[in-house]
Image: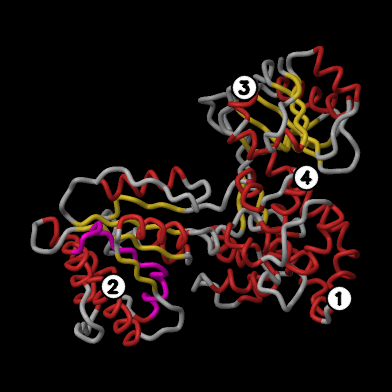
Amino acid sequence: MGEIGKPGRLLDRDHEWRLLNGFLADPASELRLAVVSGRRRNGKSFLLEALTEAVGGLYLTAVQEEGRVPALRRFTEAIAAHAGVRPGAMRLDDWSDVLTAALEVVNRAAGASLIVIDELPYLLQHSPEIPGFLQLLYDQSQSGRAPGGRIVLCGSAMSVMSELLSGTKPLRGRAVLDLRLPAFDYRTARTHWGVGDPGMALEIDAVLGGAPGYRPLAAGPAPQSEAEFGPWVERTLLDPGRALYSRVEAEFLLREDPRITHRTLYYDVLSAVARGASTPAKVGSMLERSRSAMVAPLEVLESTGYIRKEQDLLKARHPVISVADPVIRFNQLITLPMVDLVERRRGGQVWQSSRPTYHSKILGPHFEETARDWARSFAIDETGLSLGAVGTAEIADPAARTKHEIDVLAMAPGERPQSPRAAIALIGEAKATIQPRGLKDLERLEHIRTLLAAQGHRPDDAALALFSLHGFRQDVIDAAARRRDILLVDVGALYGDRPVRGLR
């Protein structure tokens, strides 16, 4: 099979489309399996439906809370329809027969021998034997005793999908593709929402992230200015009558993982992390529980992608924990603390009183993470810098008896994190506060560079980067014009609208 052109309705997803193309183009006649997973609303079904339609394959999807018998009947009817036989002419009573018949049908049909089984975790709730039958078919196919073809298994419950290929599970070692579909990056999300102003694109990204499935659910057109942003938030995330009401959406996301049975505990853990508890011990202290009691819930939330653990790049210490999902962060910090007012349709009042929290706990941290994303994904092409691992770090200042947090740290290519004499390529500070950044901010970075050298690292060639949501003072702009070690990145440069200042 030749390469299948990506449909025009698919934004981005070039890498994923190429991987799926290669999966289908494999000349082997035996059965091949692929797993596609990712957070709900990231566009997995949209992508796989487009692929199935493009090649004429068979797309089957499970339904939540549907029992085993209705699911068997509905899958059987879909297989019959794909085979071109009349409804009711085919009777299949177990999943072994369904899977075998599906493979036989797609191998005889005119299109590609592709089967997509979407929302697999719903099926596994009542039919846990399905992976075992797939293993049997796969093994038999390798010796010519069962049909070949291509099967894609898809689902949003990350723990269920990751366990398909783990340990002693039946499908371990049998999938040639394990594709996790991420949300759009911040630049693609801006295009998806159709927002002209980069600052406004950042604010939308701060509260909703890059999940493409949110745009059809949002109320009205996307905001294009600061004056439109507040009312838009009120009628989307803070309106209980809307599909994107953050409390309902957060509950919906947490229900995806079958391990999250006591949602009150997980809500409390997420709220503690959102308020700044960055280690299991701090989370436990805030919730008046032991550190050990927090380890398992935090591991579950990390595996689902709702929190992230970021290791210090310079020294081995406990990772810093933060909320990774913007909708959940918004819900824990703004909606839940004032849920009584929100439920009484007072979203405007809630938003106005929550603006300080939004700027300090949501927009500020999101701007820092976006600066790190820029360094990982775009800095090499847009500055000519050679960067390796990108992250954060904390460095002691013995003379001042304090510590300095480094918002954006990039190591030189090939350097291993936590190595004692690391070569540093970039030291950066990212601030979303309303004041433009100036020479004092640059002096702080110079001081940090001196501290790094004193502690044995090699930062002599490191670029000093200031990231600012509200621009720069003329003094630091003049310094960047004179020197070759300064990088000034405003929100327009973050989004690629204009060049980065400095490093000429």
4 or 2: tag closer to the N-terminus: 2
Q: Which residue is mark 3?
A: 385
State the CA–CA distance, disc 4 to disc 1.
26 Å
Contact (Cβ within 8 Å) of mark 3 with mark 1: no
Residue at x-position 69% and y-position 52%: 205
Give x and y (percent) for residue 87.
25, 84
Q: Is residue 176 left or right of residue 255?
A: left
Q: Classify 11 as above or below 133.
A: above
Q: Classify 154 as above or below 63.
A: above
Magenta includes 296?
no
Depth check: 13 or 480 in front? 13
Give x and y (percent) for residue 146.
12, 64
Give x and y (percent) for residue 101.
19, 72
State the CA–CA distance, disc 1 to disc 2.
48 Å
Front tag of 4 and 2: 4
3 or 1: tag closer to the N-terminus: 1
Contact (Cβ within 8 Å) of mark 4 with mark 2: no
Magenta includes 119?
yes
State the CA–CA distance, disc 3 to disc 1.
49 Å
Residue at x-position 64% and y-position 69%: 250
Q: Which residue is mark 4?
A: 199
4 or 1: tag closer to the N-terminus: 4
Q: Which residue is mark 1?
A: 346
Q: Which residue is mark 2?
A: 130
